[in-house]
Amino acid sequence: VIDMGQSEHSVITTCAYCGVGCAFKAEMKGQEVVRMVPWKDGKANHGHSCVKGRFAWGYATHQDRMLKPMIRSDISQPWREVSWDEAIGYAASELKRIQSKYGRDSIGGITSSRCTNEETYLVQKLVRAAFGTNNVDTCARVCHSPTGYGLKTTLGESAGTQTFDSVMHTDVIIIMGANPSAAHPVFASRLKRRLREGAKLIVIDPRQIEFVNAPHVKADYHLPVRPGTNTALLTSMAHVIATEGLVDEAFVAERCEAPAFQQWRDFVSRPENSPEAMEDVTGVSALDLRAAARLFATHGNGSIYYGLGVTEHSQGSTTVMAIANLAMATGNLGREGVGVNPLRGQNNVQGSCDMGSFPHELPGYRHISDDTVRAQFEQDWGVKLQPEPGLRIPNMFDAAISGSFKGLYCQGEDIVQSDPNTQHVAKALASMECIIVQDIFLNETAKYAHVFLPGSSFLEKDGTFTNAERRISRVRQVMQPKAGLADWEVTCALSNALGYPMNYSHPSQIMDEIARLTPTFSGVSFKKIDELGGSVQWPCNAEAPDGTPIMHVDEFVRGKGRFMITKYVPSDERSTRKYPLLLTTGRILSQYNVGAQTRRTPNVLWHSEDVLEMHPHDAEDRGIRHGDMVAIQSRAGETVLRADITERVQPGVVYTTFHFPESGANVVTTDNTDWATDCPEYKVTAVQARLVSEP
Ligand code: SF4
């Protein structure tokens, strides 16, 4: 906190939007934010920011903020404002009633990637220790869970390998299934700087993202992959590398498991995996693909940046493993300028995964079935833990519909708007007997809730967020919690009401507990982070007291790197006579995820609705013109969007964003999920489109 006199002061904190994790100086007059200034010493942003972060304080002080706890016995009844004590007491009694009637595993919780590490840790502790079940999951389930699975399997750790600054040492970059200019703008500026200095660029995306044609940073190759065929494309890139003598044999021999590598080499070398054989599947010219593969394998340091256009597929985990294969085969891991870099969507999606939010993992990605690890937590927490993994979010919905899952604590997540197949989610929620929503706004999910607990915005929190480069950054309280309690205090109160004591006097004590129980965090404390200038990259422990900017330097976390076979399996969502178009989704610069925050800031002046991008040929076939209202229908549902006729999308593909509840893109997305993690297949939905009305 910097005192500027006369009740003016400023507080250094961290942006609560995307996974770049920019540091900001909040300039205050008393309890009022006057402006947010990007902090020049922020290690993730070096004094830069985007249009989202700069205006973020707008939503925190918006008139729609809910500041009173509320309860109702039935969702057909109006809400009744009550005291914190009454709301917490009612929630606890309902959860106990449900468990005594339907059993211990009839309730669960969902943690939020928007909340701090400390808050997320407490929610998973509440579920495991106070509820007595492992039915805890995180919204990362629906975005980067395949990253966790794929990178842990191949490299041994569920995280990106580099710092953002590492890109300044790269010679050739692959951007795959990500749109950094819209979703990670501050990092996009660094990418552009490196490209202007001469680095080469390969964009793999069904759509012409800004990087394909931006002035001075035009991609050397754009591979416009057909939605749902990422695995086929990367396997055919691997074919070129394996069959044209482009493998970094020395790296592979020293760093990777030999039998798995040989199996991979045999597999990708098969003729059916050649770019020519895959051309009809991926829609990508074999000539371009061969040239791009050669460029990546031979042009010095190569780094790969990817986003949800990789993970949110039925083969999301396979594609992540194919990316890791590509990096290992070309020797592009373990030093500056290379690496595998998932661009995380939300501010703390890395952290929510690190903190044990998955039903099968305790903090630090240790399996719940590991007796030694479980015993350590049991001793510290003073409870017996269940050894079997709990339910994932989609399993919770299915169990609710079949009648065995009846109670949910959902913190900082609007699952009705953000999860696929809205109708299915709504049916599941309507089948439950007690839903507790904790949020700063009365969101779409709250329509199904029985208890509403007002949440605190990032400006009211003390704690840490972990960004896409594993950087744990301090979040400092700028103003007092508007509803009287911070989120971590609410979780503690609920736990105490359930009979499991949870008492901390400050979030720093929660981090101390995390450090005590998690080897990769054992050197982390608020004091340590402050000493290091406000952030540290994990692992931070006795071996790496000042953190770890680059992972897998001398050996992989799992020892030897493990190549995996990445056989392409077509998605169930394919264009058919009835549903001839493939819908894919993404974001725009000014809005963030379901828009709950950015729609309540001046950002809404830039964009105020989701639109449907459609190629001119497809539009002409259907008599649709720019600005017309168009109905898109899938086997899950139907919604209406305004048409944006553009060649940014290829013929046969349509594209929209999901920032506005009015258009509700997830009404049409389906129940398809990744085979390994149940991450929904948001990026491929077969749809038909028809003109509804002219403007
Ligand atoms: Fe930085 Fe992302 Fe916030 Fe923009 S939204 S200021 S890029 S953290």
Image (cartoon, rainbow, N blue to C red):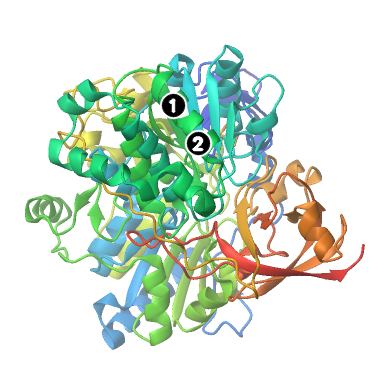
Q: Quadrant of residue 217?
A: top right
Q: Is residue 31 visible?
A: yes
First along the sequence among labels 2 and 1: 2
94 or 629: nearer the eye? 629
Mark 1 crowd level (few <14, some 14–19, many ≥20, 10 Å Cα): some
Q: In this view of the protein, which residue sits in the foreground, 25 or 90?
A: 25
581 relative to 402 in the view: left or right? right
Asked if labels 1 and 2 touch by Cβ distance under 8 angstroms, the answer is no
Q: Secondary structure at mark 1?
A: helix
Q: Residue furthest right?
A: 695
In the picture of the structure, the residue carrying the numbered disc 2 is: 289
User: Where residue 529 sits: x, y (%)?
Assistant: 35, 25
Image quadrant containing the C terminus: bottom right
How far across and down, in percent of the image, does residue 210 sit? 67, 34
Q: Which mark is residue 420?
A: none
Q: Which mark is residue 294?
A: 1
Please name the residue shown 83% across and 65% down the image.
629
Q: Position of residue 86 (x, y in %)?
A: 46, 71
Q: In the visual, does 169 lie left or right of 39?
A: left
Give the residue displayed 46% in from the left and 42% down from the top: 275
Q: Would you call the spot at circle 2 few (<14 residues within 10 Å), some (14-19), or many (20 or more)?
A: many
At x 48%, y 16%, the residue is 168
| Residue 153 shown left or right of residue 302 in the figure | left
| Amino acid type indicated by mark 2 | Leu
Q: Nearer the viewer, residue 675 or 322?
A: 322
Real-space Cα distance between discs 2 and 1? Answer: 9 Å
Callout 2: SS: helix
The quarter of the image that holds ligand 1 is top right
The answer to whether residue 23 is visible is no
